[in-house]
Image (cartoon, helix red, strand yellow):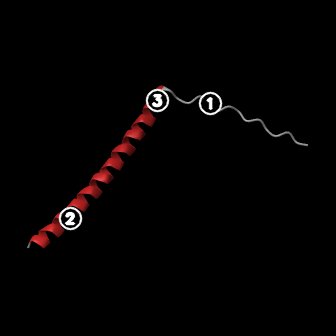
């Protein structure tokens, strides 16, 4: 019985760690997206500088 409980506990720990890592990635992604939207709203990028065309020879 003890070996069975140890295996179940190990499996539960692995599942918990996997779920925690996935949640951490989702939170980081959401925060990065929110910061990007915040910066785009308050400090929009200026128009891109025009590129010069290559001179024909």
**Side of 48 relative to 30 (left or right):** right
Picture layout, residue 14 above or below residue 4: above
**Residue beneath the point at 25% across and 61% down:** 14
User: Number of labelled discs?
Assistant: 3
Quadrant (top left/top right/bottom left/bottom right) for the C terminus = top right
Seen as rendered, the residue at the extreme front is: 2
Could you tell me which secondary element the residue under label 2 belongs to? helix
> Picture quarter containing residue 48?
top right
Check contact, mark 3 vs mark 1: CB within 8 A.
no
Label 2 sits on residue:
10
Residue at image mark 3: 41
Residue 32 vs 3, above or below: the answer is above
Report helix, strand or loop for mark 3.
helix
Camera-side residue of 21 and 2:
2
**Mark 3 Cα within 10 Å, few/some/many (few <14, many 20+)?**
few
Q: Secondary structure at mark 1?
A: loop
Q: Which residue is mark 1?
A: 47
The front one of 4 and 32 is: 4
């Amino acid at each position: 019985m003890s070996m069975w409980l140890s295996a179940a506990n190990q499996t539960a720990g692995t599942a918990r760690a996997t779920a925690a890592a996935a949640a951490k990635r989702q939170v980081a992604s959401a925060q990065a997206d929110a910061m990007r939207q915040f910066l785009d709203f308050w400090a929009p990028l200026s128009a891109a500088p025009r590129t010069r065309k290559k001179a024909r020879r």
